Image (cartoon, rainbow, N blue to C red):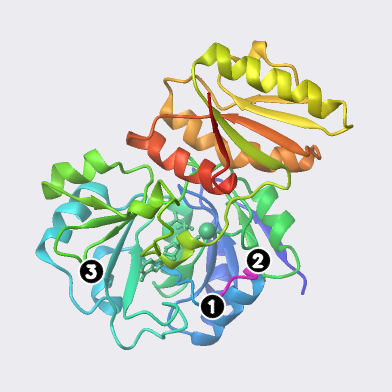
Amino acid sequence: METKKCIIDKNFIDCETLKEAGEIIKNGGLVAFPTETVYGLGGDAFNPESSKKIYAAKGRPSDNPLIVHIYRIEDIHKVAESVPEKAYALFDEYWPGPLTVILPKKKELPKETTGGLDTVAVRMPSDPIAAEFIKQSGGFVAAPSANRSGRPSPTVAKYVIEDLDGLVDMIIDGGDCEIGLESTIIDLTEETPMILRPGYITPADLERIFGSVSIDKTIISDTDKAKPKAPGMKYRHYAPKGELTIVRGKSEEVIDYINNNSAQIAALNKRIGVICTDETKASYKADSVKSLGRRSDERAIAKNLFRILREFDDEQIDVIFAEGFENNGLSMATMNRLLKAAGHKEVYL
Ligand code: TXA
Ligand code: MG
């Protein structure tokens, strides 16, 4: 299949191109599009054939449900059977934005879209290109992240093209994704709302609204081997081609450990990459040393992680060492992705 590629400037949105993209969706085709979190791979949420095509293009297991993207709040009633009162406080504060809610699904929504579940994940993105695209598509776009299954989610169009060129009808390049990590997922079907995937909207943000929230334990540890409530969280994910290890401990000890190991591994003719912070960048010796940003800048660190994992692949790095981060606030989301990318391989000093 020939994939059409279009560039759209967020500040001067080209509605003609988005109309064309919308027609593709209405006709059962697939379009990759930018959002504020990561790029999405969109199809018509009400067309079961479109959802099947998404799974095929991504190489994704079909028991892993898709998020339905809408562009106005009232449309939630077309995909969710009921919306609890408490959800509206959340929408007031965080929609449109990087937050996905799980609700009981409307029976009209095909089970192919929800991976066979009775619940549906719904998100209203704030990115203006995404919003106009969803509107032009008829209002309901099912979309996972626009990567081949298992790869880091794309935050720039270049990596969408790398994974999906020839497999989808159109790729819209809208520049960098502002946030760079996928949306926070909160399950509102539970008595106490439960975070199924951490993201830009933090547990503290959600506690301010609900009083208390619980967190799916499988997010941070895989020691108990429990099954995560978001089916997608059980799969190996975000993995770079190189073998990634997270190293935790006092900064000087982490630097020594990584430099000593890098020297030994380099002797085996392997290429080494290091993921670090501005404060420590100059201290590492490796083939490629990349900083996520200042250690105190949680947003920069979250935004740059997926892009850097992809860049190491471009540079054919065989072994990667990464500094670790705190397990709270936005850093909890970054650590969740980093741990999954590393297959939970961590060294504590
Ligand atoms: O920021 C995002 O959420 C991006 C952009 C494109 O919107 N989308 C995204 O989709 O990350 P995806 O498919 O890569 O991740 C969706 C996650 C998966 O882990 C899936 O299992 C979970 O949401 N999910 C979807 N529907 C669910 C449901 N009904 N119950 C529990 N988890 C669900
Ligand atoms: Mg994904």
Range covered by the magenta-colored residues: 58-62
Secondary structure under badge 3? helix
The numbered disc on residue 80 is: none
N-terminal-most mark, 2 or 1? 1
Kind of residue at disc 3: Glu
Q: Which residue is mark 1?
A: 62
Look at the numbered disc 1 and give the secondary structure of its residue.
loop
The residue singled out by tag 2 in the image is 170
Q: Are marks 3 and 1 in contact (CB under 8 Å)?
A: no
Q: In the structure shown, which secondary structural element does the residue marked by tag 2 occupy?
A: strand
In front: label 3 or label 1: 1
**Residue 224 belongs to magenta span:** no
Residue 108 appears left or right of 143: left
Density class for disc 1 (Cα within 10 Å; few <14, some 14-19, many ≥20) is: some
Q: Quadrant of residue 273?
A: top right
Give the spatial CA distance, label 2 vs label 1: 22 Å
Q: Would residue 279 be seen by someone viewing this image from the given angle?
A: no
Specify the principal SS of the magenta part. loop
Q: Position of residue 302 (x, y in %)?
A: 48, 36
N-term mark: 2 or 3: 3
Judge: label 3 CB < 8 Å from ligand 1.
no
